[in-house]
Amino acid sequence: MSTNRQNFDTSKQAPTWTPDRPYDQLPGLPPDIDLETRAALKACIGARAALAELKQATALIPNPAMLINTLPMLEAQASSAIENIVTTADELFRQLPAERVDDPAAREALRYREALLEGARALRDRPLGTGAAERICSRIKDVDVSVRRVPGTALKSSTSGRVVYTPPEGEARIRDLLADWERFLHAGDDLDPLIRMAVAHYQFEAIHPFTDGNGRTGRILNSLFLVDRGLLGLPILYLSRFINTHRAEYHQLLLGVTRDADWDSWVVYLLRGVEETARWTTDKIRAIRDLAEHTREHVRAALPKLYSHELVDVIFEQPYCRIGHLVAAGIAERQTASRYLAALVDLGVLQQQVAGRTKLFLHPKLLRVLTTEGDAFDPYAPP
């Protein structure tokens, strides 16, 4: 969804809006209404509790790479699917490390993951704002991206083909709107940060500053904002899962803010998504932790001379392991690493696959936990 207007006006009065004309009078932030309604605050309570539980579960994972290498990939796949860039999580995991990826959809989704992780690293030195959005979008699109300079952008219904929204025009106006959005992100008032995130997400999508990649950039900014505010320890909230599942409602409620200034419904929707997604992600982390412990016990009992804590850590960092992963982790040289992985195949922990001239070692139980709704896994057969 998107919005913008020329003759930048920070008035909070709802301006006249028509879908097929640039929304040059998009109101500034914050809107001149009570954002912290009873419904919004109730949604905040549930979302905050779920995020706190997720943050705690994240801290209990001894090797953060188990989460950083996996959950952002699920977010990348779902966020790309919202934009009709269709690939599968299994295909994306198979492509890592992504030196060469032939499928265009997989390439874009993998760049989304990299943009998310690079954005999280950049938080240490650079605040969220227009520059961060440009860098994120540039990484997603793999070209240098700046705010739109030419008119002609319009959002159309995928079913009827009719224009449903026309964003602002003019680089100066768009940058003015982004500057206002950036000030709101970092304002020192006492507005709940979750409500601030929801309002800022609408505004970014309404400004629609880039010719492409706005939705994915905006969703990355949501995760980074939660990390920046200390509500998440790692950028692993799988929020695009909720949005993708409720995609029609997502677009309808964004339009409801534009057309009717219905902020409350939008804020409650997004915070419901944060709560549901945080709980889902927490359950996945617990399942990964339980599977890792079960795998340690199984490998230790069956292969005591081969077993090491570090070896099991590596095969949990992503569902498809390569010989080079063990070498890079300092576990063994190539010949010995190959022998270790072959032993885990014989034990039934891994499955060997061949991709061209590369051997891949799939961890099927981990892939199943990550890519299915359920969290249970079948125990390993006794050796």
Image (cartoon, grey):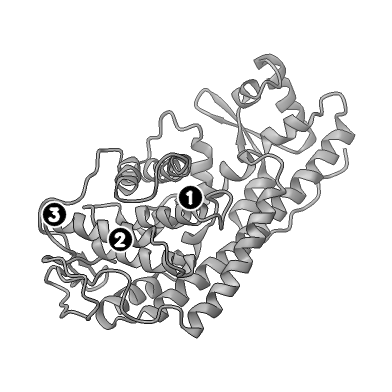
- Coordinates of residue 33 in the picture (x, y in percent): 34, 81
Label 1: few (<14), some (14–19) or many (≥20) C-alpha neighbours in 10 Å: some
- Secondary structure under tag 1 reads loop
At x 55%, y 51%, the residue is 236
Camera-nearest residue between 165 and 93: 165
- Coordinates of residue 59 in the picture (x, y in percent): 68, 49
Quarter of the picture holding the C terminus: top right
**Looking at the image, how many numbered discs can be counted on the residues?**
3
Mark 2 or mark 1, whichever is nearer to me: 2
* Residue that label 1 marks: 88
Which mark sits nearer the N-terminus, 3 or 2? Answer: 3
Above or below — where is 307 with respect to 108? above
Q: In the picture, residue 36 is in which quadrant?
A: bottom left
Q: Marks 1 and 3, Cα distance to the nearest angstrom? A: 39 Å
* Residue that label 3 marks: 172
- Residue type at the position of mark 2: Trp
Which mark sits nearer the N-terminus, 2 or 1? Answer: 1
State yes or no: discs 2 and 1 in contact (Cβ < 8 Å). Answer: no
Which mark sits nearer the N-terminus, 1 or 3? Answer: 1
Camera-nearest residue between 72 and 302: 72
